[in-house]
Amino acid sequence: MAFDYEKDPAAIYAKSFQIIRSESAESLAQIPESVEPLAVRLMHAVGMTDLVPDLRFSTRCMAAGIAAIQQGNPILVDTQMVAGGITRRFLSVDHGGAGNDVLVTLNDPLVPHLAAEIGTTRTAAAMELWRPHLDGAVVAIGNAPTALFRLLEMIRDGESKPALVLGFPVGFVGAAESKQCLVDEADALDLDYVALLGRRGGTPLASAAVNALSIAAL
Amino acid sequence: MAFDYEKDPAAIYAKSFQIIRSESAESLAQIPESVEPLAVRLMHAVGMTDLVPDLRFSTRCMAAGIAAIQQGNPILVDTQMVAGGITRRFLSVDHGGAGNDVLVTLNDPLVPHLAAEIGTTRTAAAMELWRPHLDGAVVAIGNAPTALFRLLEMIRDGESKPALVLGFPVGFVGAAESKQCLVDEADALDLDYVALLGRRGGTPLASAAVNALSIAAL
């Protein structure tokens, strides 16, 4: 016995995007055309059409991210879940991509020691291992506010700058604050960024932002 | 230069749960005590305290999931992202867990062929490869509505039953319908389940539900 439901992936995709564009038409009209595909993909990832009012981004965010991906620069992510949500097909040289590496340092055996030594979360300690890879990278943070705060501190202290910071920490303690900090400090640090203000965030949003850029970079 | 933010993981955790319990106190009071830790963990995963009114579950859902995990039954998940969000430490024999396997069949080389043959999504086709593992398993679906629909069809057609279905498909086409179908059919199929009605869902919720059960099973 079969239930009646849409099974065609292309139809599901098209209808989803149609619903998102229709329900969020008013808010989408307020943002630059270039950012629209990314905004739509974020809403697609979480089943919510009210994200745009909380979305913040630098003027050159899309160009910065697309160039970094096209140049084959690494994509640094804070958790294995964000890495798992990145569609490698869009990055694969075989499919027209630049073959970018996706790096997660959280599970490096050094991290627990570093966290204890510095007195911070493991996620923030894992940022230390990003240092050699940061220059020109696309950074996507979908989990820990402490990771985003620590990244901003490293950059303020003179560390090499990523091409783009995708800021999507989620939760109740520090998430809203860390994203507001990114937005507030971006000019002074000369950083390109995309962030979702407030408590909402998470790995599907961080992955979706990377995927939107990868598709735009093809 | 350092920003001022909470860096102690235990403090972040405690404060987050305190905020969640405080903001959702009224809705939490409406659900059984046994389900409360799972509900809190779901809200923690997505930074939203308004989930409980959309939460549906069978009377014995916690007992069913906890027993399955304690018996070492497999955990079947629809995507690598859900697997990535499952805290293996809680399942590890070294940490008091039952050493459950976490299985994802989506990336099996057979899947694209099966999808074309059956005429469905890859995610739903991947369900075919669950058949030998379904009996008594904990199933967590955090992405595709078609996977949940297909699972329910397989069970209705006589396939072995999982101990518990965690239904968290997300999105605009079929997500709400697939979860409503799970709730509507559960009695007839004699299925234990937890599901979040509506469009909201996603991998962090599916992983968080598994983690809540794993912790309760320790």
Image: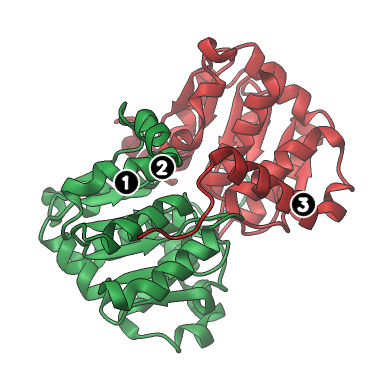
Chain colours: A green, B red
Task: Provide the secondary structure element on which disc 1 rests.
Answer: helix
Look at mark 2 in the image and give the residue it sits on. Answer: A123
Q: Are marks 2 and 1 on the same chain?
A: yes
Q: Which mark is residue B52?
A: 3
Rendered location of residue B47, percent (x, y):
61, 55
Chain to which mark 1 belongs: A
How many angstroms separate mark 3 from mark 1 (CA)? 35 Å
Which residue is at the front of the view, B63 or A167? A167
Q: Chain of mark 3?
A: B
Residue A90 placement, left or right of A20: left
Q: Nearer the viewer, residue B42 or B9?
A: B9
Dot 2 crowding, Cα within 10 Å, few <14, some 14–19, many 20+: many
Circle 2: residue type: Thr
- The residue closer to the viewer here, A72 or A93, is A72
Q: Secondary structure at mark 3?
A: helix
Q: What separation in Å lies between label 2 and label 1 (alpha carbons)?
A: 7 Å
The amino acid pointed to by label 3 is Val
Quarter of the view holding residue A156: bottom left
Question: Is residue A201 positioned above or below B133 on the image?
Answer: below
Name the spot of residue A87 as percent of width and height, x first.
30, 50
Tell me the distance, in whole angstroms, between the alpha carbons under discs 2 and 3.
29 Å
Which residue is at a point 44% across and 46% down the rendered structure image? B120
